[in-house]
Image (cartoon, helix red, strand yellow):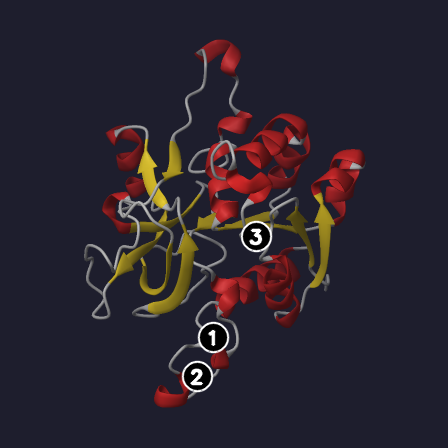
């Protein structure tokens, strides 16, 4: 049985790599945190891993737009390696800034990275994460509903709601047009939605950013790539819940199953 190997990609401005490292290691994986410059120098390095994680933070200061510079590096400098990685049935997880990177690299919701533009003209990005409707940074805990089990990271988890923190200024999920929304809905690619404590879709502050249809996370058509704005790596230990002294301790944090399912998949399939 393979010991799953995770590559956590970091660059200037990444700041959730240690938490993501801890979560995957706790789930049983061997984890390396690798700077983008090292990977660009030795692109074959990615072949040694079964899971690629893009953690949260503010890569390159989000100066152009959130995640855009790292997205371009992935799309234009590592496109061939990422294509091979996905074709080999490996997994990619993008959290917060990582989700922003995945959409702007055209890896979510559909893989424009693999599209032959020569026959279809200029490819238009299908979705992005835009500025929050509140026009401010939102740092709070939110309730999420699991809407689909298409993602490998979700597996067979049947939980009414989970509770995770968000911390972002550009977390509003929007799509290019109604056709994209209809497609990801029909394909069961909407994995998480923001809800209230009763599990009902609700507006601000339950939906912290104004995302279309309260979407908090999506996967690609294969289920191998997951992007989400809330931070599962910040709630893997029960004592990380803000009310644990009042409500008692759970067996594990609500975000831990995402890392556990990814590790289980690799152990089963590689």
Q: Could you say which is closer to the camera, residue 21 or residue 107?
A: 21
Task: Determine whether the residue tagged by mark 2 lies in a helix, strand or loop.
Answer: loop
Q: Dot 3, how many residues are within 10 Å of its Cα: few (below 14), some (14-19), or many (20+)?
A: many
Q: Taking 209 as reference, is 14 left or right?
A: right
Which of the two discs, 2 and 3, sits closer to the camera? Answer: 3
Dots 2 and 3: beta carbons under 8 Å? no
Query: Spatial distance from mark 3 to mark 1, Cα to Cα?
Result: 18 Å
Q: Which residue is mark 3?
A: 55
Q: Which mark is residue 253?
A: 1
Q: Which residue is mark 2?
A: 250
> Residues at badges 2 and 1 in contact (C-beta under 8 Å)?
yes
Q: Secondary structure at mark 3?
A: loop
How far separated are the C-alphas under marks 2 and 1?
A: 7 Å
Give coordinates of residue 128: x percent, y percent.
Answer: 39, 36
User: Where residue 77 appears, x then y in whole percent?
Assistant: 67, 28
Q: Compared to 251, does 117 lie above or below?
A: above
Looking at the picture, how far across and down is residue 74, in whole percent? 62, 33
């Amino acid at each position: 049985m393979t010991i799953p190997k995770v590559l956590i990609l970091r660059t200037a401005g990444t700041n959730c790599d240690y938490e993501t490292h801890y979560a995957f290691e706790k789930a049983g994986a061997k984890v390396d945190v690798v700077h983008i410059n090292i990977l660009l120098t030795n692109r074959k390095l990615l072949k040694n891993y079964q899971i690629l994680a893009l953690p949260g933070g503010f890569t390159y200061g989000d100066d152009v737009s959130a995640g855009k510079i790292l997205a371009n590096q992935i799309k234009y400098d590592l496109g061939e390696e990422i294509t091979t990685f996905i074709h080999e049935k490996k997994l990619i997880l993008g959290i917060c800034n990582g989700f922003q990177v995945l959409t702007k690299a055209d890896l979510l919701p559909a893989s424009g990275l693999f599209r032959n533009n020569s026959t279809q003209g200029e490819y238009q990005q299908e979705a992005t994460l835009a500025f929050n409707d509140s026009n401010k940074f939102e740092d709070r805990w939110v309730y999420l509903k699991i809407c689909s089990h298409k993602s490998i990271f979700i597996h067979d988890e049947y939980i009414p709601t989970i509770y995770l923190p968000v911390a972002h200024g550009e977390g509003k999920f929007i799509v290019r047009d109604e056709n994209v929304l209809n497609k990801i809905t029909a394909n069961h690619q909407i994995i998480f939605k923001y809800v209230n404590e009763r599990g009902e879709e609700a507006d601000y502050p339950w939906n912290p950013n104004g995302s279309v249809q309260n979407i908090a996370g999506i996967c690609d058509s294969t289920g191998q790539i997951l992007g989400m704005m809330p931070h599962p790596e910040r709630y893997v230990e029960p004592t990380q819940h803000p009310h644990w002294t009042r409500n008692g301790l759970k067996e594990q944090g609500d975000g831990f199953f995402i890392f556990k399912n990814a590790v289980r998949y690799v152990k089963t399939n590689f």
